[in-house]
Image: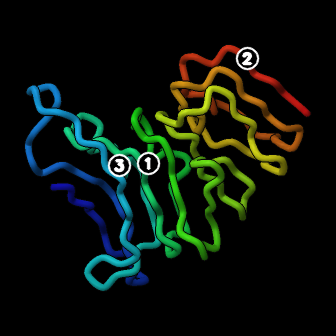
Amino acid sequence: DIILEYWVKEDGTAAIMFSKDVSGKSPRDGYDVIMLDLVVPAEIDGHPVTEVAFHAFNGLQLSMYQLRTVTLPASVVWVDDLADPFDDLFNLEAILVEIGNPVYESRDGVLYNRQTGMLVCLPGGHPAEEYAIAEGTVAVAPHAIEGEALRVLHVPDSVTVFSDALACEHLEVLHLGA
């Protein structure tokens, strides 16, 4: 009942643009929420999936299907870290990445871009009450820190870009530096 909408880029690869629940059922209408572990396919209709574009998963925000985890294939080499395709997914506990991805990695369910040294997203449903951003991280994407359970965040000295990174409401303590 979930459709991943995509577009084919000039190079023949696919970009996930939007997701939607075609069941027409919503928790607002009394339907129970169903938690899903979504695995983004490495290929759609013969096109390698290389990109997760802006708001790719936001179509499920009010759906009866709520994402618990999203697994990105090794083929994904670009996630729109400025528009945050994982924004407002408050039940999303972890973003996982298949082994062999040349750009992205998951550390304890948190998405990092290893090429740019950027923390891309600590998802809204991540269970950690305390989290330490990985040493060597140099930037945190806008609105990347969404963890609703998060109370304490440790930011290493290596982070030089942290502008507008906090999108969590319950943070009590922010530790800067080692």
Numbered circle sitting on residue 173: 2
Q: Earlier in the sequence, mark 3 or mark 1?
A: 3
Q: Nearer the viewer, residue 165 or 29?
A: 29
> How many labels were placed on the picture?
3
Q: Residue at x 43, y 83 (%)?
A: 11
Q: Nearer the viewer, mark 3 or mark 2?
A: 2
Question: Where does residue 83 sit, x and y in percent of width and height?
Answer: 48, 45
* Residues at circles 3 and 1 in contact by the CB criterion of under 8 Å: yes
Residue designated by label 3: 57
Q: Secondary structure at mark 1?
A: loop
Question: Where does residue 96 sit, x and y in percent of width and height?
Answer: 52, 57
Going by the numbered disc 3, the residue's amino acid type is Phe
Q: Earlier in the sequence, mark 3 or mark 2?
A: 3
Going by the numbered disc 2, the residue's amino acid type is Val
Q: Secondary structure at mark 3?
A: loop
Disc 1 to disc 2, C-alpha distance: 26 Å
